[in-house]
Amino acid sequence: MRGVRKSYRVGHIRQKLRPVLKGLDLTVPRGEVFGCLGPNGAGKTTTLKILVGLLRMDAGEARVLGRPLGDRAWRYRVGYLPENPYLYDYLTAREYLEYVGRLFGMSAEARKRRATELLERVGMSRAADVALRRASKGMLQRVGLAQALVNDPELVILDEPMSGLDPLGRHLIRRLILELKDAGKTVFFSTHILSDAETLCDRVALLRDGQVTAAGRLADILAIDVTHMEVLVSALSVEQVKTIAPELPARNLGERWRLEVPEASVGQVLDKVRSAQGRVLSVLPMRQSLEEFFVREMAPGQAEGAWEG
Amino acid sequence: MGGLKRVLAVAANTFRETIRERVLYNLVFFAVLMTLSGLLLNRLSIRQDEKIIKDLGLAAMDVFGTVIAIFIGVGLVSKEIERRSLFPLLAKPLGRDELLVGKAAGLAFTLLVNVAVMSAGLYLTLLLTGRVLDLGLLKAVYGIYLGLVLVLSLALLFSTVTSSAVASVCTVSVVVAGRYSDVIRNMDQVTKGVPSPVTEFLYWLLPNFRNLDFKNAVVYGLPVPFDVVALVTVYAAVYASVVLLLALVAFRRKDFQ
């Protein structure tokens, strides 16, 4: 996506334009899991909806799998799960998947086979023939994901796939995303839940106020500003720790201590630990958590309370 | 070819939806109505009760069909937009035009089944009460079905541009106005101050359901020439196509927020 702009009309009588995307630039590399992150109203869902053709952009350029948005050919190679999917509740999960298969031009036999296979994959085999009006939110999310995979897509676009799921459901979706990645598929998903992004994503993009404020490999983004090392030590008393690192942040973890040591002082601190008969358990570069990174990236007013999970 | 398959898939699913949503339950009411009318009217003279059975049957067919066409027609698109059930489907190779045409075709088929079963019920009532099976009634049934297709196309148009509640009101208004199009045309003769070009414009703009109404003619045994039937068929086809085309244009431009 290059320079994508989108505004919504708000109000009834005196309509105003509210810009949602303000020149969004985004590239999702093939074969990777890409997370689209941002607080509410950042433009994540709008971005995804433009890609799948539910919204028309006002300006800019977008291509999916190298094809322009208006080209129908890429739709055979893409799967999409909307946020909180509402599926036809008068159908069963199996019927819904078979209907979707029919839209892809699959034969009756292929549709049946694929539906059975996918229902098993998302753990819905036992509820395959229950009307969706009786399905729980978690079950709907599973069937929603299954319908996004009916055509064995190269690119899977998921809008808040973990939304409203219990731990088991979240585990299942995580596993499926990793399976897709192992199969060489590209997964582009939006999420509020930073721990999921941290676990799953090769790359992320942070959206704020309709623009990408940071994008890249997680390791690169989180390794920026590595100026401190985390030194884990044991067999030291409180007094010894205070002597070794009088001005350094130190946290007691039962029998161990976690010290945050500036990179330049690591050698000196390790020598002191050894001299005091302490044991060095590990020395690791301090990496920010994704949450720390985003909280820092947000303007103070926006960061607070904007995140979940 | 792929497009036609997708249209048929949507149409088949729409028909399945109407069956599962128990839309055709109205047929039970129709059956009860026909049975009661057959039993209760036995005391009247033969000619009279035959006309009443036919009149009642055709009118019930028209009313039930119109109510279904309006409310299911409106719900077919606006309900899906409000519930967002269209979202996963529109990301598939299914074009918006194909979806709308498929839905229209599916509901048209539901209405056809509805009308066919009601017609069978009407003939059964005539048969059981020892009346003549008048095939001329089918011309009136055909006119009713054409009218239902017009109603359906209007419901789809309104539902693509506004909410289901507003779309229902608009469709009902246009349908009622269309049933009194002659009154609208002659309004300038009754009410002073209404310029005749306005009433003339409304007359041509609104669907003219009176042209499609052969109920009285067939009940009273008046002739309904084939060329008239052909002419109203062309009228209904052109009118429904134009309305459906407008719906397609609106639906194609729609943003699904």
Image (cartoon, rainbow, N blue to C red):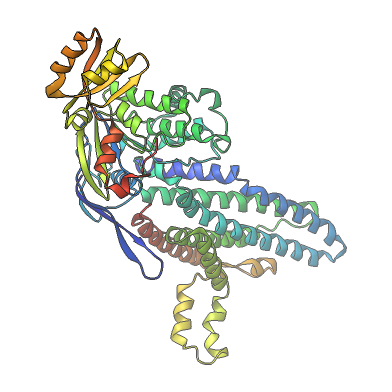
Q: Residue farthest to the left? A: A264
Where residue A305 sits in the image (x, y, percent)?
38, 44
Check the image and report above or below for B14 versus B175.
Answer: above
Residue A273 visible, this orientation: yes
Indicate the quadrant containing the N terminus of chain A: top left, top right, bottom left or bottom right.
Answer: top left
Is A219 in front, or is B41?
A: A219
Residue at the location (50% across, 69% down)?
B207
Q: Residue farthest to the right? A: B43
- Residue B69 in the figure: left or right of residue B60: left
Where residue A242 sits in the image (x, y, percent)?
26, 21
- Residue B220 in the figure: left or right of residue B109: right
Is A2 in front, or is B71?
A: A2
Where residue B29 sits in the image (x, y, percent)?
72, 53
Check the image and report above or below for B140 versus B124.
Answer: below
Is A307 in front, or is B64?
A: A307
Residue A304 lies in quadrant: top left
Indicate the quadrant containing the C terminus of chain A: top left, top right, bottom left or bottom right.
Answer: top left
Residue at the location (26% across, 24% down)?
A184
- Residue A127 in the figure: left or right of residue A153: right
Q: How many marks?
A: 0
- Residue B58 in the figure: left or right of residue A37: right
Residue A42 visible, this orientation: no
Check the image and report above or below for B187 versus B224.
Answer: below
Q: Residue farthest to the top? A: A277
